[in-house]
Image (cartoon, rainbow, N blue to C red):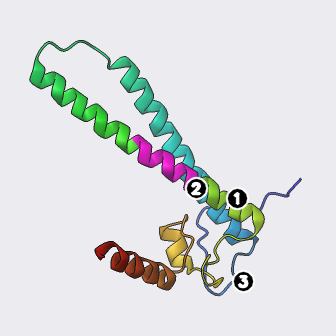
Amino acid sequence: MKQEVFLPDDYRPAEDEPFMNERQTEYFRRKLIDWKNDLMADSRDTIEGLQEGTRNIPDVADRASEETDRALELRTRDRARKLVSKINAALRRIDEGEYGYCEVTGEPISLKRLDARPIATMSLEAQERHERREKVHRDD
């Protein structure tokens, strides 16, 4: 069984420590798990709200407004579901020792980028190149 890594509450990954050492890896693992748990709790709340909120509204305008609200909430939940999938993929990369490295160049992704977007799979430069290529092909 893997030994738990001690991580102070105020810990932040720093550039002057070895990249993706045990503390950094544990920091990002916890960050991803906390994010996933928040998304899952929101999803449960949405499901409960939708189940409780089913009612017959006689006014057509009010019914349309409620349906629009429900559709928006369901779209938000679908985006959250896709995000949970990306979080799970990031957690797998941590387990496999691949987390934090660009899938295109193999170079380390900056700690600032990972802290801001822990599901990132590409360095900022590789992501920008990818988006430029995508934009060029989309304009065709």
Q: How many marks?
A: 3
Above or below residue 125? Residue 63 is above
Q: What type is the residue that disc 3 sits on?
A: Pro
Q: State which tag comes first along the sequence, 1 or 2.
A: 2
Badge 1 marks a residue whose secondary structure is helix
Magenta range is: 77-86
Residue that label 2 marks: 87
Q: Is mark 3 on a helix, strand or loop?
A: loop
CA separation in Å, label 1 and label 3: 21 Å
In the drawing, does residue 101 fall left or right of residue 50? right
Q: Residues within 10 Å of mark 2 (few under 14, many from 20)?
A: many
Q: What residue lies at 58% left-to-right and 66% top-to-bottom?
A: 10
Majority secondary structure in the magenta region:
helix
Mark before the other along the chain sequence, 1 or 3: 3
Residue assigned mark 3: 18
Q: Is residue 109 visible?
A: yes
Q: Which residue is drawn at 49% across and 67% down?
A: 117
Q: Please state which amino acid type lies under the numbered disc 1.
A: Arg
**Percent coordinates x, y for residue 96 in the rendering:** 76, 65
Q: Is residue 14 magenta?
A: no
Quadrant housing residue 21:
bottom right
Instruction: Tell me, for residue 92, which label it has, or none.
Output: 1
